[in-house]
Amino acid sequence: MKIMKFGGTSVGSASRMKEVAKLITNGDKNIVVLSAMSGTTNTLEEISDYLYKKNPEGANEIINQLEAQYRKHIEELLSTPEFKQRGMELIKSHFDYIRSFTKDLFTLFEEKVVLAQGELISTAMMNFYLQEQGVKSVLLPALEFMRTDKNADPDPVYIKDKLHNQLELHDEATLFVTQGYICRNAYGEIDNLQRGGSDYTASLIGAAVNAEEIQIWTDIDGMHNNDPRIVDKTKPVRHLQFEEAAELAYFGAKILHPTCIQPAKYANIPVRLLNTMDPNAAGTLVSNESEEGVIKAVAAKEDITAIKIKSSRMLLAHGFLRKVFEIFESYQTSIDMICTSEVGVSVTIDNNKHLNEILNDLKKYGTVTVDHDMCIICVVGDLRWENVGFEAKALDSMKNIPVRMISFGGSNYNISFLIRKSDKARALQQLSDGLFNGIK
Ligand code: ASP
Ligand code: MG
């Protein structure tokens, strides 16, 4: 069994949906995970925002616009009067439901229900189209098996159990279509796996059925060795180890959601990144296998804040770092990079929501300085410490750029530099030139 996940752009129009239909009817046994059509989840968030602000007219206007778009999609997607009618009824029932929330109290619970409609609609549309084409497909209701626990983490035992129950109801079926992103929480309420969570759904399902492969279909040719929007002569990376992919996914390579990696890695199921625009292209394979002695890719993450805490009390003192970390923890702010010396520690964060409170608390322990508008550049590949020369090569490419922090040795797969955001493009280009293109 293979899992095939298609993101919002891949199902973003009737014609794109028809392309997806061709790809999923390849004769194999597939579970297909779909996102909402592109833009839909954003629009549903916008509707929710109006409802939070107690502006039902504002919400209604957007609901009507979105419904009109969907009626057009149905018109283009389906061709027989019977299916067109069923399609229009589907759209009407979902939008009437969304509209019902404009009349009552609107809280987080209602918002989750509104946000779930995008995937419910896209999968039902795909299923209608397949049926109209005479393809036997089964719509698997994600809300019957995808579930999170009390910590809002997916519950793999529950998912496996309930998903198998669903699959057993359709023993002879070979094509299943289901919703990405949506789930129920520990209390049985409709919830979701956070924005972009459809990749996570695919990976959780892959692990639950012990799939042969998890395919993530997008509209680019796999993961590139640098950001193609900024750097010229980037190339797709053909193979990545899971941890390399995790570093890249976190550090800005938008192609694969970071949460998606862990379930696949633990279940040892390869993830293949493929391109709906060019289905025969090789894409990128992510697996537990690593390639020795190769630097794979460079990625960057912007809007980073660096905080330095300097204290003579740190000298020879134990417990200093714990106190510092506790402050970040108490404001639910995670630290990305850390560098220490005997008299100080520098950390970076990518979320400034509680920056002022954090700085206030840190000042109890030392002199605090902050650098704004920074950027983490992360070089990923076989960077085990025994390999000689790789970190020197990366440093050499950065030699004319002011570097605020360097982090190496945290994993076997990465070296990170903290630089000014304004130096980002130059750094990325120079690293590509030096590491991949042999240009000095
Ligand atoms: N539709 C959701 C979003 O836009 C989930 C996803 O596409 O992965 O965030
Ligand atoms: Mg997505």
Image (cartoon, rainbow, N blue to C red):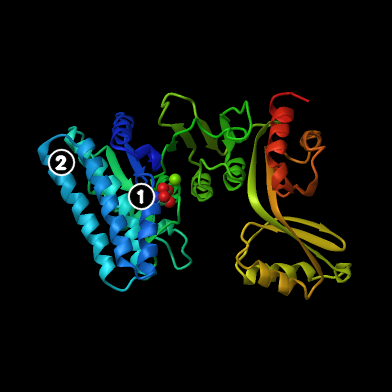
Who's the residue at 25% across and 70% down the image?
Answer: 103
Who's the residue at 85% across and 68% down the image?
Answer: 311
Q: In the rendering, at what x and y percent does residue 348 appear? A: 70, 57
In the rendered image, the vertical position of residue 347 relative to residue 242, given as above or below: below
Which element is circle 2 on?
Answer: helix
- Residue pushed farthest left? 82
List the residue tagged with mark 2. 84
Does the closest atom of ligand 1 sit within 8 Å of the Cβ of label 1?
Answer: yes
Who's the residue at 10% across and 40% down the image?
Answer: 82
User: Residue 251 versus residue 359: which sits nearer the camera?
Assistant: 359
Q: In screen coordinates, is 114 left or right of 417? A: left
Q: Do the residues under discs 2 and 1 have CB atoms within 8 angstroms?
A: no
List the residue tagged with mark 1. 40
Q: In the rendering, at what x and y percent does residue 267 appear? A: 49, 46
Q: Quadrant of the C terminus?
A: top right
In the rendered image, the vertical position of residue 224 relative to residue 182, given as above or below: above
Amino acid residing under circle 1:
Thr
Q: In screen coordinates, is 385 left or right of 425? A: right
Amino acid residing under circle 2:
Lys
Q: In screen coordinates, is 268 left or right of 354? A: left
